Amino acid sequence: MQELNSNNKAITKKQVRLSCMNLLQKRIHELNEIERSAQESAAGDTKSSMGDKHETSRELLQQEREMAGRRMAEAIRQKEELERILPEHVLNQVQTGALVETSIGTFFFATALGFITLHEKKIAVLSIASPIGQALKEKQLGDIVSFQNKDIRIISIA
């Protein structure tokens, strides 16, 4: 099945992937702004007569820049993972790149982004390495998997 239906609107893997890419682009832009702002603050920070306060301020700015840098690297890695997924590729089992509708919800196995909403349908964007991803990995349409004391039936795979 190529698409999932919700409120009579088709949700395609291409739409889900695009929504994830947009989310990551926004995140990367925000992190660039944080890093730029921290750099400007550090550059504008002049040594005052209160040396310890100045050093503490510079250290906090440095930590903020380093954290933004790590988050930026992660967002870029996630974007690269998404770029490797070909939305037109039809899958017959759960694997990276699969959009899977189950009896407990809809999952897009790509990279760990959390939840997105398309056409009022909540979709969990997860890595195949996640616990639910591992439980569903290589399963096919109609398979039933037991996960956390719940039976999960695979309704569709795109």
Image (spheres, grey):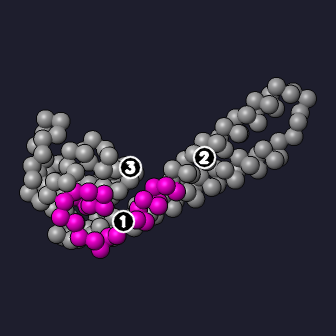
The residue shown at (55%, 51%) is: 73
Q: Is residue 9 visible?
A: no
Horizontal arrangement in the rendering, residue 73 relative to residue 91 (left or right): right
Label 2 belongs to which residue?
A: 68
Q: Nearer the viewer, mark 1 or mark 2?
A: 1
The residue shown at (34%, 50%) is: 127
List x then y, in percent, for residue 10: 23, 71
Q: Secondary structure at mark 3?
A: loop
Q: CA distance from mark 3 to mark 2?
A: 18 Å
Q: Earlier in the sequence, mark 3 or mark 2?
A: 2
In the image, is residue 95 part of the stretch drawn in magenta? yes
Q: CA distance from mark 1 to mark 2?
A: 26 Å
Q: Residue furthest right?
A: 49
The amino acid at mark 3 is Ala
User: Which label number is shown at residue 112?
Assistant: 3
Q: Earlier in the sequence, mark 1 or mark 2?
A: 2
Quarter of the C terminus within the rendering: bottom left
List x then y, in percent, for residue 56: 75, 29
The amino acid at mark 2 is Ala
Which range is magenta?
76-100
Q: Main secondary structure of the magenta part?
A: loop
Q: Are marks 3 and 2 in contact (CB under 8 Å)?
A: no
Q: Secondary structure at mark 2?
A: helix
The residue shown at (30%, 50%) is: 128
List x then y, in percent, for residue 14: 33, 70
Quarter of the N terminus within the rendering: bottom left
User: Which label number is shown at residue 85?
Assistant: 1
Q: Badge 1 local density, few (<14 within 10 Å), some, or many (20+)?
A: some
Q: Secondary structure at mark 1?
A: loop
Q: Are marks 1 and 2 in contact (CB under 8 Å)?
A: no
Residue nearest the observer in this picture, 54 or 66: 66
